[in-house]
Image (cartoon, rainbow, N blue to C red):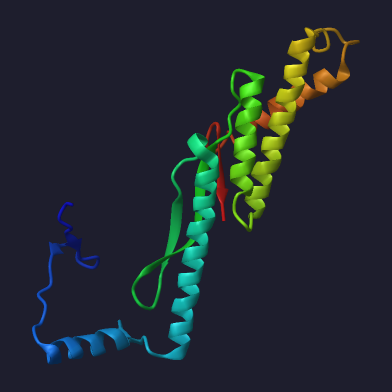
Amino acid sequence: MGRKILIDSVSGTVGWQPQRVGRRAAAAESDSASTQINGVDLSAPEVQRQIQQLRATDQRVRQHEQAHVSAGGPHAGSPSYQFTRGPDNKNYAVAGEVPIDASPEQDPEATIRKMETVKRAALAPADPSPQDLRVAQQADAVAAQARSEQRRQETGDDRGARDGDGNLAAVRGAAAYGSAAAIGTRARPNAFSISV
């Protein structure tokens, strides 16, 4: 395994800190380091509660985003997180998102399979967010349109879109498919972000 180099977050310099030797030095360092950081008394009950809440939030956010990644398979990207620094000077994840490719495929059957995966990824966490629910609904809409396109191809009926007296459902379906396929393409083409 490679050697780890610590970077001092305040100065940005690479370095190491020498350790004191002996029981007294270790006890003194432990007592002073564990009770105060940046003038904050870490042993205070309200500070301990805040740290516990931040740890719980961090764990919940990471589990939530990992559920998206696990269920999204090859269509899910890597999670990204927003952090806050706690009174103990550690970073805690407080929000996150996972990009997922929700673009339609060339083949309606492949689009249906992909949208099923997108929906599973969106609903994978135990507590889906409102954004997760929107992504699942959008995946359902794209899959429904792909099913309609698949039925149209199987029956060979392509008159509905060309002649005004044809299959009105096919015309509406094609419009819905186009709308659903375009959802979310303004900010990031062919991808949705599933976030907490």
Q: Position of residue 71 (x, y in %)?
A: 55, 43
Locate residue 143 relative to residue 190 in the image: left or right.
right
The C terminus lies in quadrant: bottom right
Whether 43 is drawn above or below 2: the answer is below
Tell me which residue sits at (62%, 18%) in the image: 107
Tell me which residue sits at (82%, 7%) in the image: 159
Q: Position of residue 52 (x, y in %)?
A: 47, 77
Q: Position of residue 183 (x, y in %)?
A: 64, 35
Question: Would residue 95 be visible to someone looking at this image?
Answer: no
Tell me which residue sits at (55%, 31%) in the image: 190
The residue furthest right is 165
Q: Position of residue 103 (x, y in %)?
A: 58, 29
Whether 116 is drawn above or below 111: the answer is below
**Tally of numbered tags:** 0
Locate residue 18 relative to residue 115 in the image: left or right.
left
Locate residue 77 relative to residue 161 in the image: left or right.
left
Residue 45, picture quadrant: bottom left
Residue 177, picture quadrant: top right
Question: Would residue 181 be visible to someone looking at this image?
Answer: yes
